[in-house]
Image (cartoon, helix red, strand yellow):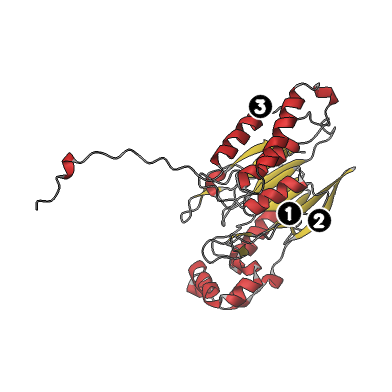
């Protein structure tokens, strides 16, 4: 028997693959586009100028002036003492009133638990980062030997800062979903975020993005973090980690915004869609001055460099006022 002539075979129609919940997400997106967010409260007379950076990976870009400097982690390429100390020295020399820093998955020195569990990975990083003539004493230095120079370091902790007659509450965490063998990571299917952000948090500083917010075309952000952001509604969320996600966006987490976020991340269903529908239809008939005012949440992916090996500064620091 002669084999079939493939050129004479009928061409199969392309198979259309539909993702689970695609219809619900589609309708939710449509409702969100029709929604008129509530009016914002009046702007403060003296706004706080905030400079946001992340993923400098050993580079030292020029920073604009401001009241508050935020660095969302990945100070270094390899995470060694010399690299981190060089970044801290640079940051502490800046003129901003307050400077707040968290670690990223590259900053191995700051994750003592990781270094204990993976000593070979730590040794490899040290050898890759430093020439032989610099090995020795610095290899035995720990995070306790770092000179912070007035920099505030947050690691799953909060700080309240005073700016004139205003106070700002900041919560910072270095945690990111597992990818490779790096510091401060957790399994992707583990919820480490529920009820983690303290009440009245104004600024959330994390290394990785929430799902669906400046997290790249592959949507590499954490859905559990997205749910927690929608619950806690900070004024500003600053992160990096996904270099290609650089940028800034806003979302109001009113009833419609929270439901839309929940449907997108998968933790809300058709009941939330019905709630959206009622609010959108009712809200379009309600005068704006009858609606409760609400601040939007600003998302800022402030990754400074591009690429994963040849780190070069591409993106400018992000400037925000609140």
Q: In x, y percent, where is residue 121?
A: 52, 72
Q: Residue at x 62, y 48 (%)?
A: 266
Q: Quadrant of residue 187?
A: bottom right
In the rendered image of this protein, does residue 121 appear above or below residue 15? below
Residue receiving disc 3: 34
User: How far apart are the two marked residues, 1 and 2, measured between alpha carbons?
Assistant: 9 Å
Residue at the left extreme of this rendering: 1
In the rendered image of this protein, does residue 251 appear above or below residue 167? above
Q: In x, y percent, where is residue 82?
A: 60, 67
Element type at mark 2:
strand
Residue receiving disc 2: 159
Residue receiving disc 1: 100
In the rendered image of this protein, does residue 86 appear above or below residue 298? below
Q: In x, y percent, where is residue 69?
A: 72, 48
Mark closer to the chain start, 2 or 3:
3
Mark closer to the chain start, 1 or 2:
1
Q: Residue at x 78, y 36 (%)?
A: 295
Tag count = 3
In the rendered image of this protein, does residue 269 appear above or below residue 90? above
Element type at mark 1:
strand
Q: Quadrant of residue 154?
A: bottom right
Residue at the right extreme of this rendering: 165
Crowding at dot 2, Cα within 10 Å, few <14 / some 14-19 / many 20+, comes out as some
**Badge 1 vs badge 2, beta-carbon distance below 8 Å:** yes
Looking at this view, is 100 or 58 the one in front? 100
Crowding at dot 3, Cα within 10 Å, few <14 / some 14-19 / many 20+, comes out as few
Q: Nearer the viewer, mark 2 or mark 3?
A: 3
Looking at this view, is 317 or 134 the one in front? 317
Looking at this view, is 209 or 224 the one in front? 224
């Amino acid at each position: 028997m002669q084999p079939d002539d493939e050129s004479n075979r009928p061409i199969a129609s392309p198979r259309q693959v539909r993702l689970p919940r695609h219809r619900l997400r589609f309708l939710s997106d449509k409702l969100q586009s029709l929604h008129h967010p509530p009016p914002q409260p009046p702007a403060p007379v003296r706004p706080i100028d905030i400079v946001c950076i992340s993923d400098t990976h050993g580079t030292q870009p020029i920073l604009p002036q401001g009241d508050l400097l935020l660095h969302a982690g990945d100070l270094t390429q390899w995470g060694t003492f010399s690299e981190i100390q060089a970044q801290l020295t640079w940051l502490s020399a800046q003129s901003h009133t307050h400077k707040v820093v968290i670690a990223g998955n590259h900053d191995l020195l700051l994750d003592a638990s990781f270094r204990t569990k993976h000593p070979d990975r730590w040794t490899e990083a040290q050898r890759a980062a430093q020439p032989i003539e610099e090995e020795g004493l610095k290899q035995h230095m720990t995070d306790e030997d770092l000179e912070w120079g007035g920099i505030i370091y947050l690691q799953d902790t909060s700080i309240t800062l005073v700016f004139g007659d205003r106070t700002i509450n900041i919560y910072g965490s270095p945690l990111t979903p597992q990818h490779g063998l790096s510091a401060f990571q957790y399994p992707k299917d583990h919820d480490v975020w529920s009820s983690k952000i303290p009440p009245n948090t104004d600024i959330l500083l994390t290394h990785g993005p929430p799902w669906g917010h400046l997290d790249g075309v592959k949507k590499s952000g954490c859905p559990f973090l997205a749910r927690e952001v929608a619950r806690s509604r900070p004024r500003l969320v600053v992160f990096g980690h996904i270099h290609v996600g650089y940028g800034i966006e806003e979302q109001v987490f009113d009833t419609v915004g929270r439901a839309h976020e929940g449907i997108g991340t998968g933790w809300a269903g058709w009941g939330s869609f019905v709630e959206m529908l009622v609010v959108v239809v009712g809200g379009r008939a309600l005068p704006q001055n009858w609606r409760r005012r609400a601040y939007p949440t600003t998302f800022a992916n402030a990754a400074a460099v591009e690429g994963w090996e040849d780190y070069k500064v591409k993106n400018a620091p992000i400037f925000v006022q609140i």
